Amino acid sequence: EAGVTQSPTHLIKTRGQQATLRCSPISGHTSVYWYQQALGLGLQFLLWYDEGEERNRGNFPPRFSGRQFPNYSSELNVNALELEDSALYLCASSRRLAGNTGELFFGEGSRLTVL
Amino acid sequence: GQQVMQIPQYQHVQEGEDFTTYCNSSTTLSNIQWYKQRPGGHPVFLIQLVKSGEVKKQKRLTFQFGEAKKNSSLHITATQTTDVGTYFCTLSGNTPLVFGKGTRLSVIA
């Protein structure tokens, strides 16, 4: 069974540009989560998608957005990039269990560097 | 929203020593999950605890859920170099997982 896949592995952008990161969940998983992990910091929750809908978002500005496609894959868009957006962006997927978030399966992440 | 505090933030141990990390919340948790992230890797699920006072073991790892379901601990007996990494606890429930800042474990051979 293929795991969660993310692309690109690395991305270098300059301030003010836009970045798009992509994620393919494990087959059968309908929930996709995005987390930001800046150097030395923990996992900061960004966005949660389930069945094509945005279910929740973390404390990030609106320039962080995304969507989930009918095949449950997802993309994260970051507009007007700032230096502090440099981080590892992790995508995770899970089965959506009633009343409970199931085990998260993480991808290897996309390393975004903003110069 | 709910938050978790994890202590310690860093721990350096000699190989063979024991290690414990604690996860505390001000509110009652529905359940809790633990993850491990190796250096340069991604978080990997270890276990989920659901019941008050629950204790689960995985080889040298022992996980506990507090009686009041407000805290949890992970204890590693006789650490090995393969235990190196950051251990995260998360709040689990009907909302996206909120991660603690993690405890970074270094093991000196």
Image (spheres, rainbow, N blue to C red):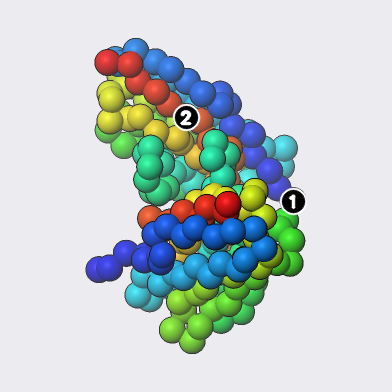
Three-letter code for the amino acid on which mark 2 is drawn: Arg
Residue A65 shows in this picture: yes
* Residue at disc 1, secondary structure: loop
Three-letter code for the amino acid on which mark 1 is drawn: Gly
Residue at the bottom extreme, as displayed? A70
> What numbered label is drawn on residue A26?
none
Q: Quadrant of residue A51?
A: bottom right
Q: Is residue A6 above or below residue B16?
A: below
> What numbered label is drawn on residue B1?
1
| Same chain letter for marks 2 and 1 | yes
> What numbered label is drawn on residue B104?
2
Which mark is first along the chain, 1 or 2? 1
Q: Position of residue A96 (x, y in %)?
A: 50, 70
All told, the count of numbered labels is 2
Circle 2 packing at 10 Å, graded few (<14), some (14-19), many (20+), is: many
Q: Is residue B38 above or below residue A100?
A: above
Q: Is residue A69 above or below residue B13?
A: below
Q: Position of residue A67 (x, y in %)?
A: 58, 77
Q: Residue at x 32, y 22 (%)?
A: B79
Q: Residue at x 49, y 86 (%)?
A: A70
